[in-house]
Structures are given as C-alpha cells and as structure tokens.
Image (cartoon, coloured by chain):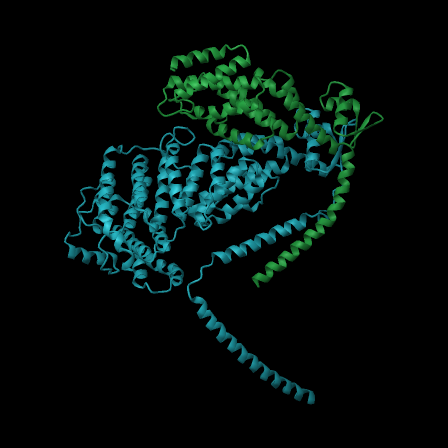
Chain colours: A cyan, B green
C-alpha cells in the first residue's frame, strides 16, 4: 500500500499552495449571491438520477480490508438499515459530519487499491448527505480534517464564507498523526497529507451546496477553478470525481441568466471548456469523465437546438462501452431525441426504449423517466403505433403524461378536429417538453388513421364522405390523400376516379404474412441480447473459479456416490419387485 | 482596406443591375471582409462591420437564388448562420432579412427532399421563436407546403404556388422544381391507387395543360394508353414479385431458427 502513494504525497503541499491562492482570488471577483435561474425545469429531475444508496458504514468496511469485496456489496443493504435506525437519535449535525468523514477512508482505499468502486461508493453517499448540508457542517469537516496551515482548507473555507472558522486540530506533527488516525478510524499511520481526492470530494460538496442555494454565479466560478485544479492533477483515481465536478459546473451554467435558448447563455461559452475536457479524458482513457462530458455536451447543444452540432458530436465520438448505467441512459435519451428530429423514428424508438429501461426505477429519477417516456410516446405515434394503455396508468407517470393521453386518444380514433383541439389546449405543456414540433408532424398520421378506419369499416365509400368525415378542405385533397395512403401501404384499396369512390380490398390474413415471424424474431433477439448483456455485466471475483472447481469435483463425487446408491437401490427395488411378482 | 470601402461596396451591391456584375462585387466584398477579419464574427469585431457583413451575405444569398445557383446559396446561408446566432445586443436583429433567407433555405431543403435537414432547421426556429415561425410570412410558406406535401394534399400545394401566395419573387424560383416533384409524387401514387384512368381527367390530376402533355408524360413513365384510358403496367409486376418473396420468407425462417438453436446451445 504505501509503495503506491509516496510520490504523490511528496509534491502535494506545493500543489495545494498554488491552487489555494487561486481559489482565494476567485473569491474576490465572485459577485455576491446573484439569484439566477428561478425554479427547476421538469427535466432537471435528471440531475437527481444518482441511484440513492444511503452511505454504507465506511468504518466497518475499512476495518476489514481483507474481506471479499463481493461480500461488501451484498451486505450493504442490511448495514445501512441498521445505521439509519440509529441515526434518529444522534444529533443531525454530528451525524452529517461523520457521514461526510466516513467517505474519506473510502477515497483513501480507492487510491491505495486503485479501485474506482470505492470512489463511486463515496459519491453515492452524497445524495443522502445533500439534504443536511450547511456551510457550518462543511466548515466543521474541513477544520477537523485539515491542519490549519493548509491553503486548500483555507480556500475551501473561503468558498463557503466561513474563513474565520477555527481549526480544532492542533498543528503539531505528532498530534496530527494521532487525530488523523482517530478521524479516519482506520489507524493508517503513514497518512500525513490530505489526498487531493478528499479536496475534490469536498469541492463537489461545496458545489452541491451552491446549487441548492441557487447561487449559480459563484458556483460556476468555483467550479471553473475546481476543473483547473483537476486538470493539473492528472490522477486516475480522480476520474469519477472530476466527472461529477463537470456535471455540476454545466448545471450552474445552465441555470444562469440568460437561460439556454438565448444565444448569449453561459452554456455556449462553456462548450470550449467541455470539449477540451473531453479531449483530455479520451487521451487519458478516463471513461467516467468522457461519458459524462459527452452527455453534457449533447444536452448543451440540444438546449440551444444546435442539432447539427450534436449529431456531428455523436458521429465523431465513441461513447465508452463501460460507462455507468446512468450516463448510458442519458446518452440514449439525447440520441433518441436527435434521431426523432431527423425523422429516423425507428432508431429513435430503439434508443428511447433502451433509455427508459435503463433509467433507475427509484422515485428520484422520475423526472428522467417521465421525459424519456413522453418522447418515446410521441415517436411511437409518429411510427404509426399506438402506445399501450398501461403506460399511462403508472402512478409516477399518470399526471405528467395526461396531455399525451389525450393526444394518443385523438390519434387512435383518427379525428382531426379532436387532435387539433388537444394541441391547442396543451401546447404549453408540449412546448415545455420540447415535443411540440414532433407533435405537429402527427397530423398526417391522424389523417392516415382516419382513412384506415374508414377503409376497414366500409367496403366502398365516396370521396365526398371521406372529405366530410376527416374535415378536409376539398374532395380533390381527399383523393390525393387517399392515393398517397394507398401508395404508402397504409390501406389496401383502389380508387375510381370517374365515379369518385374508394373501394377497399379484402383484408388478408395477417398470419399468412411475414409479420408474426418478424415480431417473434424481434422478441427472441431482445431476449438473447438481454442474456448476453447480463452475462457481460456479471463480475467474477478472482480465483473464485478454483473454489468452484473444487466444489464441482465434490459434487461430482457426491453424484457418483448417489448414482451408486441409486443403482444399489434399484437393485433393491428390483429385488423387491421380483418378490412382488413372485407373490 | 477600411470600413468605408466595405460600406461603398455593399451600397453598390444593392443596386447592382446584373448577376455577373454583382458576383464580382461580392467577391470583392468578401476579400474586404477577410482583411477586416470579419468573415466570421469575432468577439472584437465592431458592430458596424458586423452589420455590413451580414447585409453583404444576405444580398449574396438572394442574388444566388435569383441566378438559381443553389450551391452558392447554401454556402451563403452557412456563412450567415454565425451572424444570426449572435445575441441581440451585439448585433440587433432588425433590418435583417433573416426570415426571408431562412424561409428560402427551408424551401430549398424541401425541394431537395432533405426532410431531415428541414426539420432540424425548423426545430431550431421553434425553440427560439416560440411558435412565431408559423405566423411569419416568409417562414410560414415552406412550413405549410411541407405539411401539405406530407399528408398528400397536392392540390393545396399547387394552389399555393399558383395563386400568388408566394411571399416574394425569390420563392417563385422553387415553384418549377416543386411542380415537377409533386407531379412525380402524384404519378407514383396513381400507379398504385387506380386500376386505370381516363386521359381527360388525368390532365387535371397531374396539373398538366393539355391532353397531349398527358400522353407525353404517360409515355415517359412507361404507362400504356388504350382506348383513351391509361393503364399501369407496374401493378401486375408487383403482384409477381410478391410470389417470389415466398421462397425468401421460408429461407429466412430457417435461418432464424438455426440461429436460435445456436444461441440456445451457448446458453445451456
């Protein structure tokens, strides 16, 4: 363990010093709390998509480092329920402070073991800490963790307006080791300097604090300095932390005045920074930052509706395969959106279906699921499918999807009048969801459905009647529209121009066509790829297979014995049977 | 090379009588812009130069449309895009022919059949304009045309093009191309929709002037004309093709089943 850390530990103080002064400067030119961006948009639910797994008892984990890691994951569930029960009795401030501190040993382990999973676990605890976060708690954590001379600590304190906080930790070296070991509870004596991971982790917490206070301008400035610092550090163990830093940075910019659709929005000026971050991340093979930044850029472009740029970004970058599930879900959502705008509905539908499936089912990701589902519904309608009724009954969706339910009903029946009144009535909601232009394209689908309904119910109908029923402007329009519907394969019919009617052909047996076969094939494919993916997603602990081999051998022996016994038993039975027969 | 020179050039450009003269003026303007470092807007370009540059490009775009040079027009539109993206306090939106140029660009995409590009452009307008686009005279026209084309109301498209609803003379350039497009669309629809058509009513259907033109058009598409009626030979061809598919279908089914078997083997 120590062999991996020393070289970084050696130059740490210098780095801290350099960046520390920067951070102080930043404070000076930061404007006093300017409230930007009022109210969260519905889409911002995405930001909460982090799967909430309350903090695991870190001290317990670090006290048993030799334990099988798979075991830890399984145990998490039990541990935290026990902890939550206990939490009610403890003072909330102390509890929050200890929660934050519990993440530090995880970060340290991530560094020493070079395993990003520990960092992720620390990040996961953020969502539970978030609700209780106050500057005082942060100040207490900082003062208790850092020695008072640390410039990093000073800059962090300045960022939360607690620069006068007194350091509870004595400054003498011997004592420091002592309190350090107490604070981290892991008793690592060699731990003299604070890891940069801890700095950044606290930085992320401060970012969240700004975000909750809606202090976007200061947050953006602080984030910018944080990204500069990350850039200079180049440590692989920082990857997932830096991804998070960029994520909040972009959120700040999004909520600053003027809001995104305007070309003067700060998101536009953020693009170069994100692009260079992406370049660096790709070169460093930093999967976390890479995936996060790609998603952020897509979101950025789409917010100002630069669809071409977004499309180019998608074609010129490769989204990392092993990105975290949430990022994949977001990426697929944005990709689906781009494809829907480009009229590539089949692709869009695939992406959006995958996005809704990959979205975590916990209530904190409801916003994401809702907007993905909305878009998916519209794309389904555009493809000529009618979404299932069950989608609208889901408790978390019911209210958000209400306008879409009316829309689907209008499209399903093929009533143009009803369709148009629905659009008029809910145009606000549709505009907000960014589906308005897509929905306008549905008009032709409504007409087609109307024609299909009529062709199913009448074997012969005059163009005049079609015109009246669909509320079209003229009989000629009706004729052209029906002709087009026949050409596009919407209906099986023929037209008679002289006498002005449409004659439907006999509807063939669906089971005689290739359609059921195709549907079957599609489902089988889905099942197979699900199986493949779940196999890929499984994690196999090292050397576990030897154990299994041994087990298998034992099992085989047992089986052999059993077979032998059965054989014997068989013989007995036979014998018995023989006796029976004999009787 | 100064701003004044640019100003003169742009003024001359507006009153240029012929396309050839204008195009030589345009290339001079572009050179001047390049020397002023204003071919694409920089953060330190003065507003007056930006205004002139935009005006020059807009004139260039309209001129190239009048000369039916679509490639040049597309280039000008792309050059104009960064100017249009500038916030209003850097470059005020008034006096700009933005909607006209954008509308023409939309129409161009429509005639080229690039619906994806059309909708991509439209999406951007929608977000910025909050529904203003449809009400705008220049933008509303291509949007309406697209909707009618998609649902198949070809007569409405025809009427819109004929009845001087066209917002400006530049839009008229596209009418000819659009007429050909819709005529071909109608023809392909008729091939499948009608068993046969009398020549006399086909004239109205295809918006042709005389029966002679109908016969000519029918021949160019390979339709048969018998006893004053038009028959479509492609229909019978299609029926034949479906029978051939049968064999393909069973082959596909066998392939799929073998695939399942292989996959199952790897799983079990």
Q: Quadrant of residue A86?
A: bottom left
The image position of residue A311, as x and y in percent, is 49, 37
Q: Who is closer to the viewer here, B155 or A439? A: B155
Q: Relative to A131, is A406 above or below? A: above
Q: Residue furthest right?
A: B227
- The residue that appears at 39% across and 63% down in the rendered structure is A71
Residue A108 x, y percent position in the rendering: 29, 55
* Above or below: residue B106 compared with residue A128: above
Of residues A319 and A411, the one drawn nearer to the viewer in this rendering? A319
Q: Where is A387 relative to B94, above or below?
A: below
**Corner quadrant of residue B160:** top right
> Considering the image in quadrants, where does the N terminus of chain B appear?
top left
Asked if residue A583 shows in the view, the reply is no
Q: Residue at x 53, y 18 (%)?
A: B62
Tell me residue A180's x, y (percent): 21, 56
Furthest residue in direction left, as rendered: A172
For the point 73% across and 18% down, which residue is it?
B209
């Amino acid at each position: 363990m120590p062999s991996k850390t020393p070289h970084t530990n050696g130059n740490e103080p210098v780095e801290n010093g350099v960046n520390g002064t920067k951070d102080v400067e930043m404070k000076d030119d930061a404007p006093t709390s300017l409230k930007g961006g009022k109210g969260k948009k519905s889409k911002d639910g995405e930001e909460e998509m982090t799967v909430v797994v309350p903090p695991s008892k870190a001290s317990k984990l670090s006290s048993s480092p030799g334990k099988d890691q798979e075991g830890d994951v399984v145990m998490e569930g039990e541990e935290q329920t026990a902890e939550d029960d206990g939490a009610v009795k403890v003072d909330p401030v102390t509890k929050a402070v200890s929660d934050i501190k519990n993440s530090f040993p995880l970060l340290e382990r991530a560094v020493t073991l070079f395993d990003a999973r520990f960092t992720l676990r620390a990040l996961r605890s953020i969502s539970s800490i978030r609700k209780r976060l106050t500057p005082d708690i942060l100040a207490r954590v900082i003062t208790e963790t850092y020695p008072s001379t640390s410039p990093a600590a000073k800059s962090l304190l300045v960022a939360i307006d607690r620069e006068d906080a007194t350091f509870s930790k004595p400054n003498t070296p011997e004592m420091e080791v002592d309190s350090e070991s107490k604070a981290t509870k892991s008793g690592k004596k060699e731990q003299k300097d604070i890891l940069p991971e801890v700095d950044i982790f606290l930085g992320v917490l401060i970012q969240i604090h700004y975000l909750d206070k809606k202090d976007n301008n200061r947050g953006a400035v602080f984030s910018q300095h944080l990204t500069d610092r990350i850039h200079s550090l180049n440590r692989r163990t920082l990857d997932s932390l830096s991804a998070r830093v960029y994520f909040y940075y972009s959120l700040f910019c999004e909520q600053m005045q003027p809001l995104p659709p305007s070309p003067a929005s700060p998101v536009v000026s953020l693009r170069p920074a994100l692009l260079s971050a992406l370049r660096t991340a790709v070169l460093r093979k930093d999967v976390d930052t890479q995936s996060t930044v790609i998603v952020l850029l897509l979101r950025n472009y789409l917010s100002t509706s630069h669809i071409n740029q977004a499309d180019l970004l998608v074609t010129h970058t490769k989204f990392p395969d092993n990105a975290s599930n949430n990022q994949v879900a977001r990426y697929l959502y944005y990709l689906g959106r781009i494809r829907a705008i480009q009229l590539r509905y089949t692709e869009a539908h695939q992406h959006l279906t995958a996005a809704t499936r990959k979205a975590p089912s916990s209530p904190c990701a409801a916003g994401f699921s809702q907007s993905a589902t909305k878009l998916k519904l519209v794309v389904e309608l555009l493809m000529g499918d009618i979404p299932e009724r069950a989608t609208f009954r889901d408790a978390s969706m019911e209210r958000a999807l209400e306008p879409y339910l009316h829309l689907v009903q209008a499209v399903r029946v093929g009533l143009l009048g009803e369709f148009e009144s629905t659009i008029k009535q809910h145009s606000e909601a549709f505009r907000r969801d960014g589906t308005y232009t897509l929905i306008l394209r549905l008009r032709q689908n409504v007409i087609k459905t109307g024609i299909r309904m009529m062709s199913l119910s009448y074997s012969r109908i005059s163009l005049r009647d079609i015109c009246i029923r669909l509320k079209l402007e003229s009989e000629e329009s009706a004729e052209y529209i029906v002709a087009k519907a026949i050409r596009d394969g919407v209906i099986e019919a023929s037209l008679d121009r002289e006498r002005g009617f449409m004659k439907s052909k006999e509807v063939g047996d669906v089971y005689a066509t290739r359609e059921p076969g195709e549907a079957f094939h599609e489902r089988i494919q889905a099942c197979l790829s699900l199986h493949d993916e779940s196999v890929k997603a499984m994690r196999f602990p090292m050397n576990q297979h030897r154990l299994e081999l041994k087990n298998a051998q034992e099992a085989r022996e047992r089986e052999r014995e059993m077979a032998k016994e059965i054989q014997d038993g068989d013989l007995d039975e036979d014998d018995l049977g023989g006796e029976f027969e004999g009787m | 090379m100064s701003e004044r020179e640019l100003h003169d050039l742009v003024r001359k450009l507006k009153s240029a009588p012929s396309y050839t003269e204008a195009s030589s003026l345009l290339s001079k303007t572009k050179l001047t812009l390049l020397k002023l470092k204003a071919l694409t807007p920089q953060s330190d370009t003065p507003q007056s130069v930006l205004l002139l540059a935009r005006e020059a490009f807009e004139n260039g775009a309209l001129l190239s449309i009048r000369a039916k040079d679509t490639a040049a027009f597309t280039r000008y539109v792309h050059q104009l895009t960064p100017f249009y993206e500038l916030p209003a306090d850097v470059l005020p939106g008034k006096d700009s022919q933005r909607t006209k140029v954008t509308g023409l660009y939309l129409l161009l995409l429509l005639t080229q059949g690039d619906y994806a590009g059309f909708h991509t452009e439209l999406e951007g307008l929608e977000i910025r304009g909050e529904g203003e686009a449809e009400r705008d005279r220049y933008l509303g026209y291509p949007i309406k045309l697209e909707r009618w084309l998609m649902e198949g109301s070809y007569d409405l498209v025809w009427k819109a093009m004929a009845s001087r609803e066209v917002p400006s003379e530049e839009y008229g350039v596209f009418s000819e191309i659009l007429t050909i497009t819709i005529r071909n669309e109608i023809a392909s629809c008729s091939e499948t929709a009608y068993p046969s058509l009398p020549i006399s009513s086909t004239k109205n259907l295809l918006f042709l002037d005389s029966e002679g033109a109908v016969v000519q058009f029918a021949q160019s598409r390979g339709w048969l004309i018998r006893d004053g009626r038009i028959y479509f030979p492609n229909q019978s061809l299609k029926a034949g093709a479906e029978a051939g598919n049968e064999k393909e279908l069973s082959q596909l089914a066998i392939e799929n089943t073998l695939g399942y078997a292989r996959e199952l083997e790897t799983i079990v």
